Amino acid sequence: MGEHIIPLHDLRRAPSRPAGPVPAWDGRPPVDRLGRPLRDLRISVTDRCNFRCSYCMPKEVFDKRYNFLPHSALLSFEEITRIARLFVAQGVRKLRLTGGEPLLRKNIETLIGMLAELRTPDGQPLDITLTTNGSVLARKARALKDAGLQRVTVSLDALDDAVFKRMNDVDFPVAEVLRGIEAAQAVGLAPIKVNMVVKRGTNDQEILPMAEHFRHSGIVLRFIEYMDVGATNGWRMDEVLPSAQLLERLQQVHALRPLEAASPGETAERWAYADGSGEIGLISSVTQAFCGDCNRARLSTEGRLFLCLFASAGHDLRALLRDGADDAHISSTIAAIWQQRADRYSELRGVGGAVPGARRVEMHYIGG
Ligand code: SAM
Ligand code: SF4
Ligand code: SF4
């Protein structure tokens, strides 16, 4: 008998790993089995997107027949806010809304307003941000800012229209994303970061023009190594441009000096132009694993908690919410799950320990 192939969407329904009996949470922020605290919660608010970036939601897979989640499956704003509040009590200080395309979630500014009211145990507001493809940012920037969003990260893979359109695969023009970035700047969403996923042979010729465009703008351009997330993007190592090589290309044109990490667990290595014209970031998820201080948890669109971008199963927090569990029980469950965490996929991949092509959850479902 041939191998039983699990259709992609079934992975979203993979059973939670059994947590066993849950000991009561002692109120101290948990650390995982590798001593890592929980600081950053990324919340996917929709699994839908108006782009079909080949490295994330290739058209051939995410077509008309693809079963996106029905609205009833999504966490409501109240459910998201309740979970976020419990995570904040466990040490989370940063919330990032993502997707899919988060700005496609109806009334997203209402959710931002609700999250902006949360406070840390010592009364501080949270660092709230959002990653977007920028397609509707020009229209939404003001409402997002007014709702309490502080900053924003915009993805843009090229300045050349033909290259960008090929990458988003829906013919979306660069100018419209740039308009979104300008609108975000104008309303004071700051600092703005721009994420560029670099695929060798596809958009690496855009590295220098992108760097040139964003110097002197106050915007931090971050180059992301093309990652083997999910199981649909046909990832190949020869399409990854290692950050070290990218840096060499930049250094042939610009003098750069390394900067200290702004916070522990930061994904990007920071470099400044020696002439003071700005800063860039290198996110080397493939060639230089940064699992050692990874303090990120991810909440999927339907309320599953994933402990790693490359995990194949999540823990079903929505079931707890909808079964009427009280805050104490949900908090104990979150703490117990985090304390069991030992994920370090990128490091293992580096030593040949991870299985290429293993079934993994898709990026648009748990967010980047
Ligand atoms: N739709 C929004 C966007 O594109 O900004 C938010 C969700 S997207 C999944 C989050 C980030 O993940 C984006 O910056 C995107 O470029 C990045 N990303 C998606 N697939 C990737 C891959 N295979 N390798 C590296 N980064 C990827
Ligand atoms: Fe959509 Fe973002 Fe994925 Fe591109 S990277 S397909 S914009 S979710
Ligand atoms: Fe964190 Fe997993 Fe990425 Fe390592 S591979 S940095 S554990 S999300």
Image (cartoon, grey):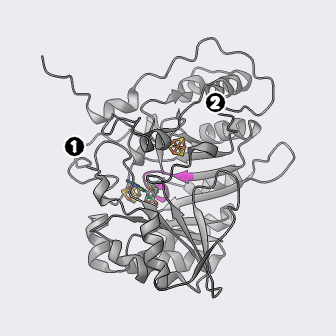
Tell me the SS state at disc 2.
helix
Tell me where the magenta segment starts and ends, as one range: 97-104
Asked if residue 80 lies in the magenta stretch, the reply is no
Q: Residue at x 29, y 35 (%)?
A: 8
Q: Position of residue 70 (x, y in %)?
A: 38, 38
Residue depth check, mark 1 versus mark 2: number of the one nearer the observer: 2
Q: Position of residue 69 (x, y in %)?
A: 38, 39
Q: Left or right: where does residue 201 sit relative to residue 118?
A: left
Task: Tell me the amino acid under the disc marked 2.
Answer: Trp
Asked if residue 102 lies in the magenta stretch, the reply is yes
Task: Tell me the amino acid under the disc marked 1.
Answer: Arg
Point out the quarter of the image occupied by ligand 2: bottom left
Q: Residue at x 57, y 60 (%)?
A: 268
Residue tagged 2: 338
Tell me the SS state at disc 1.
loop
Residue 121, image quadrant: top right
In the image, is residue 366 above or below residue 337?
Answer: below
- State which tag comes first along the sequence, 1 or 2: 1
Residue tagged 1: 65
Q: Nearer the viewer, residue 188 or 32?
A: 32
